[in-house]
Amino acid sequence: MTKDSRKINERMLWDNIARSYDQKVMLTYEDAYRQTVEAILEEVNSTSCVLDVGCGTGIIAMEIVPEVNQVIGIDLSPKMIAQARKKALKMALENVTFDEGDGYATDFDSGSFDVVILANLLHVVAEPAAVVREAHRLLAPGGILLTVTDCMGEPLPPKMWLNLIELRLMKLFGRIKYFSFFRKSYLKALLEEQGFSVEKEAEFHPAPVNYYLTGRKG
């Protein structure tokens, strides 16, 4: 797998659904997004510099930007970034920017951010450990990583089994190139292995479990 092929595969689906993403995701995850924003707001303040990796259409960034010093959102999908920029332009906000960027290796200096957000991202990338490792590099000492991730490896009610089969088939036939069926325990271990001290955890959606974790850089 080359770097270019990995990037193309990771952004393929999101380019295709960028225009309809907000409408579709809110049908299922509106409450989960609300809880995510509320949890993030507990960890930031007016001096916080925040990086939102895999920001998508800017759903989270646009909600937290009034309460922080600066938000930068990056995403591999240019079409997702285009949607996020439309929102920022409409609201005429000066302390949020959106740019194409790769969460595996950014151009930012080490220790540039107080908070890094990885929301609904780690289960749809080829190498989640690389993304968490880069987040650790980007955080200042004492900075905090905020993650929320679907855990399709957790037990599902029978009504969700068809969704699970569909996802596995989509991955098998390449419609979704990368998709991990995580357990919560794996994600906690992943953060700890990359140098974070896990401080908080919560579930923001029951099925599939939308699992929230915070990790602090020592």
Image: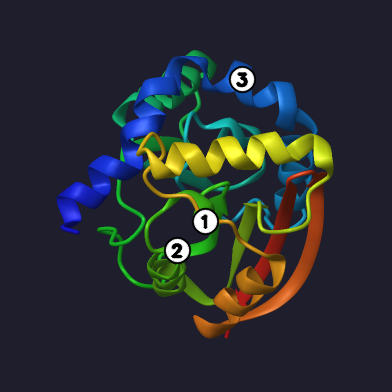
Judge whether residue 78 can be spotted in this image.
yes
Circle 1: residue type: Ser
Report the side of 54 relative to 149 (left or right). Answer: left
Tell whether label 2 touches label 1 (CB within 8 Å).
Answer: yes
Circle 2: residue type: Pro
Residue 107 placed where, x, y %? 25, 58
Tell whether label 1 touches label 3 (CB within 8 Å).
Answer: no
Q: Residue at x 75, y 38 (%)?
A: 160
Q: Residue at x 70, y 51 (%)?
A: 40
Report the side of 162 relative to 107 (left or right). Answer: right
Residue 50 placed where, x, y %? 52, 53
First in residue order: circle 2 vs circle 3: 3
Report the side of 208 relative to 193 (left or right). Answer: right
Between 188 and 156, the one lying in front of the other is 156
Which of labels 3 and 1 is toward the front? 1
Residue 60 placed where, x, y %? 61, 37
First in residue order: circle 3 vs circle 1: 3
Q: Residue at x 35, y 72 (%)?
A: 110
Which residue is the site of mark 1? 180
Between 157 and 107, the one lying in front of the other is 157
Judge whether residue 217 can be spotted in this image.
no
Secondary element at tag 2: helix
Q: Is residue 172 above or below residue 20?
A: below
Could you give the CA–CA distance between mark 1 and mark 2, rounded to whole angstroms?
Answer: 9 Å
Could you give the CA–CA distance between mark 3 and mark 1, rounded to whole angstroms?
Answer: 21 Å
Which of labels 1 and 2 is toward the front? 1
Report the side of 184 relative to 49 (left or right). Answer: right
**Numbered mark located on residue 24 in the image:** 3
Quadrant where the C terminus is found in the figure? bottom right
Circle 3: residue type: Lys
**Numbered mark located on residue 128 in the image:** 2
